């Protein structure tokens, strides 16, 4: 199985900075479980630190995700290193409708390749976003190097304001496996529920606490992956 990330642009949406030709964002996070597309990648009791950076100018974004931790799974253990780079373009298709198209490259450390069998790869992906109530999204990514498989999501999100500098983001998404995690295509992968509390600490810095709960679907059965609860915390700086 190969891990791939298009997640940065969706997980850390830049808060609007009207009138700027460019924007930059960086984040540091810790999660109690590295859950990717419903799968606990590192094994029980193994958390992950992650660093994220992204720059956007016009319709083009360049994004980086890096993950570091330890894996202890399937009889193998060692240091986990992962580096993802995504370049994407976002265009407006009509009133409140946006389309993002991108390509992602991913590189693993040698311990991950030897111990877990993950191979460096590329993905092509696209996301439709509606800037309306509940902010619905439809996304799909297709591996074009290491796997004959892809992955899709349908998501909703809503923010509850707690004053001008704090809030709670509530989100739910349905994952559809297309030969990525399981042998069959078009299966339900998982339902992911998320609650993120955030607060601005200054004009450019915010902090967040998060809880996620993944309800495993049929596609994860072949991997013996069950439901997971994930706790997380992080800091974001944006300019």
Image (tube, grey):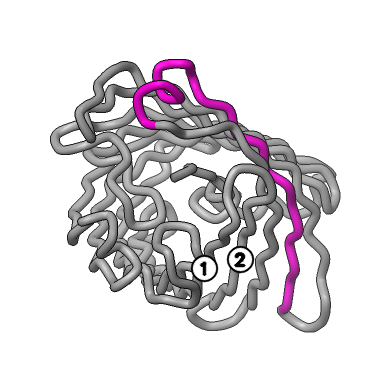
Nearer to me, 32 or 29: 32
On the question of residue 239 being in view, the answer is no
Identify whether 113 is placed above or below 198: above
Q: Earlier in the sequence, mark 2 or mark 1?
A: 2
Q: Residue at x 46, y 25 (%)?
A: 113
Decide whether residue 157 is among the magenta residues.
Answer: no
Circle 2 is placed at which residue position? 140
The numbered dot on residue 50 is none
Decide whether residue 112 is among the magenta residues.
Answer: yes
Q: Secondary structure at mark 1?
A: strand
The overriding secondary structure of the stretch rendered in magenta is: strand
Q: In the rendered view of the protein, which quadrant contains the C terminus?
A: top right
Identify whether 134 is placed above or below 199: below
Q: Residue at x 38, y 75 (%)?
A: 188
Q: Residue at x 43, y 28 (%)?
A: 67
Residue range in magenta is 97-116
Q: Classify mark 1: residues with Cα within 10 Å, few (<14), some (14-19) or many (20+).
A: many
- Left/right placement of residue 90 relative to residue 137 reads right
Circle 1 is placed at which residue position? 178
């Amino acid at each position: 199985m190969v891990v791939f990330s298009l997640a940065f642009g969706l997980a850390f949406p830049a808060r609007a900075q009207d009138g700027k030709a460019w924007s930059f964002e960086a984040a540091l996070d810790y999660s109690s479980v590295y859950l990717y597309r419903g799968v606990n990648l590192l094994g029980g009791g193994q958390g992950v630190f992650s660093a994220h950076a992204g720059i956007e100018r016009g319709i083009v974004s360049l994004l980086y995700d890096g993950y570091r931790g330890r894996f202890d799974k399937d009889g193998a253990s060692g240091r986990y290193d992962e580096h993802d780079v995504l370049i994407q373009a976002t265009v407006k298709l009509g009133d409140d409708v946006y389309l993002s198209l991108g390509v992602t490259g991913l590189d693993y450390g040698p311990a991950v390749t030897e111990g877990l069998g993950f191979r460096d790869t590329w993905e092509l992906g696209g996301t439709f976003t509606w800037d309306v109530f509940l902010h619905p999204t439809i996304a799909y990514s297709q591996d074009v190097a290491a796997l004959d498989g892809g992955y899709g999501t349908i998501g909703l999100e809503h923010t509850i304001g707690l004053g001008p500098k704090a809030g709670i983001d509530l989100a739910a998404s349905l994952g559809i496996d297309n030969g990525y995690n399981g042998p069959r295509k078009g299966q339900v992968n998982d339902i992911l529920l998320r609650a993120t509390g955030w607060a601005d600490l200054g004009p450019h810095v915010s902090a967040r606490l998060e809880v996620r709960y993944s309800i495993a679907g049929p596609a994860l059965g072949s991997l013996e992956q069950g439901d997971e609860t994930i706790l997380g915390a992080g800091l974001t700086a944006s300019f």
